[in-house]
Amino acid sequence: MKKTVEVNGVLGQNATKGNRAVIHSAEGPSYYTSKVVDVRNESKTGIEIETLNTIYKITYPEGFKLAEAV
């Protein structure tokens, strides 16, 4: 069973299957993940990504808004 990490923060870039993700935590350190194998439960308030080793449940900080394509 994979470890689950809950983080209040944002992704440094879009999470893409096959690539590593960067998660900037609002409380401290950034996370550099192993390769992403699944992106799920994406919403306006957060996202869940599964990597080779860990499941990350990311909750966006209060007041955070996703950028929209122009």
Image (spheres, rainbow, N blue to C red):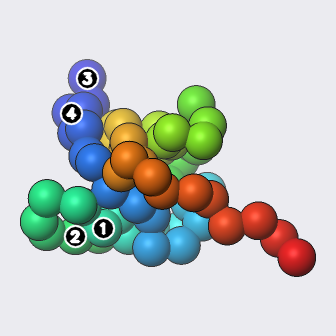
- Is residue 68 toward the left or the right of residue 59 in the image? right
Q: Earlier in the sequence, mark 2 or mark 4?
A: 4
Residue denoted by label 2: 30
How much space separates mark 1 and mark 2, taking CA atoms?
A: 4 Å
Image quadrant containing the C terminus: bottom right
How much space separates mark 4 and mark 3, taking CA atoms?
A: 7 Å
How much space separates mark 3 and mark 1, taking CA atoms?
A: 25 Å
SS class, disc 4: strand
Residues at discs 1 and 2 in contact (Cβ within 8 Å): yes
Residue denoted by label 3: 1
- Is residue 23 toward the left or the right of residue 49 in the image? left
Residues at discs 3 and 1 in contact (Cβ within 8 Å): no
- Is residue 52 toward the left or the right of residue 18 in the image? left
Which numbered mark, 3 or 2, is in the foreground of this view?
A: 2
How much space separates mark 4 and mark 1, taking CA atoms?
A: 19 Å
Three-letter amino acid code of the residue under disc 1:
His
Q: Residue at x 48, y 56 (%)?
A: 64
Query: Residue farthest to the front?
Result: 63
Tag of residue 3: 4
Three-letter amino acid code of the residue under disc 4:
Lys
Please rate how many residues cluster around mark 2, counting C-alpha atoms within 10 Å: few if below 14, some from 14 to 19, many from 20.
some
Residues at discs 4 and 3 in contact (Cβ within 8 Å): yes
How much space separates mark 2 and mark 4, taking CA atoms?
A: 17 Å
Residue denoted by label 1: 24
Q: Position of residue 9 (x, y in %)?
A: 32, 56
Q: Position of residue 17 (x, y in %)?
A: 61, 56
